[in-house]
Image (tube, helix red, strand yellow):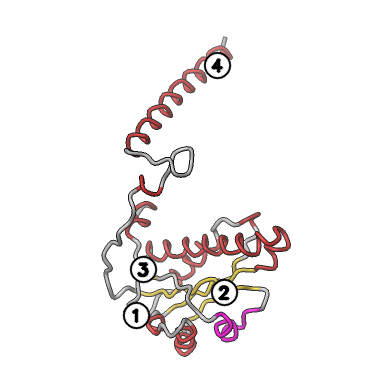
């Protein structure tokens, strides 16, 4: 599937089959997280892969007793190095960039899981101290997310989403568009015209060089 289809069809999965997941797929998912963008290319994320059944139950307990999480055969716990981002970017790095870096990696992994025919969820409700102690996470790292992954045992309906014209403004916050498709069409027209004119200029320049 192409990337837009993957984005449109991905769903949050909370019920999983009792079927193991191929480690090749897990490797691809982790690699997708590794390839995410990050502030200053610091790559401040760290991923803890958990497959042990007893530890998965304890993770579910630490996630405010969301025991459905334990049914997923694979967990990926995403941590962020807040000290390193603070060292380079100060308080904004610690409180914003570290979180954004991890979030970009999480979204990549969710899409990669879906592309591999797997279900996953983004879980951020947990008792961080309990989870850190369980996984041995150093105090310089903040746990951002738990991603339970497995073969889906449900087919959730498409959730309601706001229309594009509700969440998008033109040139200034609050400047709503009556027909956003018309605006995109007009913009596309101008871009295509500029490309044609640019191509013509390039061809003229090549002709002069040959002379």
Label 4 packing within 10 angstroms: few (<14), some (14-19), many (20+): few
For marks 3 and 4 on the same chain, the one whose residue lies earlier in the sequence = 3
- Tags 3 and 4 touching, CB below 8 Å: no
- Residue at the disc numbered 1: 19
- Residue at the disc numbered 3: 12
For marks 2 and 1 on the same chain, the one whose residue lies earlier in the sequence = 1
- Tags 2 and 1 touching, CB below 8 Å: no
Q: Does dot 2 land on a helix, a strand or a loop?
A: strand
- Residue 200 drawn in magenta: no
- Residue at the disc numbered 2: 143
Q: Nearer the viewer, mark 3 or mark 4?
A: 3
Mark 2 to mark 1 CA distance (whole Å): 27 Å
Residue 205's label in the rendered image is 4
For marks 3 and 1 on the same chain, the one whose residue lies earlier in the sequence = 3
| Range covered by the magenta-colored residues | 128-138
Q: Nearer the viewer, mark 2 or mark 4?
A: 2
Q: Does dot 3 land on a helix, a strand or a loop?
A: loop
Q: Nearer the viewer, mark 3 or mark 1?
A: 3
Mark 3 to mark 2 CA distance (whole Å): 20 Å
For marks 1 and 4 on the same chain, the one whose residue lies earlier in the sequence = 1
């Amino acid at each position: 599937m192409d990337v837009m289809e993957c984005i449109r069809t991905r769903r949050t999965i909370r019920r999983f089959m009792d079927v193991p997941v191929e480690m090749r797929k897990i490797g691809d998912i982790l690699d997708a997280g590794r390839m995410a963008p990050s502030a200053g290319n610091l790559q401040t994320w760290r991923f803890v892969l958990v497959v042990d059944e007893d530890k998965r139950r304890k993770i579910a307990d630490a996630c405010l007793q969301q025991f459905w999480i334990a049914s997923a055969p694979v967990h990926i716990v995403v941590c962020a190095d807040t000290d390193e981002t603070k060292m380079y970017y100060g308080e904004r790095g610690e409180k914003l960039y570290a979180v954004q870096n991890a979030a970009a990696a999480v979204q990549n992994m969710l899409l990669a899981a879906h592309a591999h025919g797997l279900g996953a969820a983004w879980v951020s409700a947990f008792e961080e101290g309990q989870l850190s102690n369980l996984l041995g996470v150093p105090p310089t790292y903040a746990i951002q997310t738990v991603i339970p992954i497995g073969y889906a045992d449900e087919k959730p309906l498409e959730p309601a989403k706001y229309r594009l014209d509700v969440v998008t403004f033109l040139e200034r916050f609050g400047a709503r568009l009556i027909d956003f498709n018309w605006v995109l069409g007009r913009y596309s027209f101008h871009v295509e015209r500029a490309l044609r004119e640019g191509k013509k200029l390039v061809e003229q320049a090549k002709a002069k060089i040959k002379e």
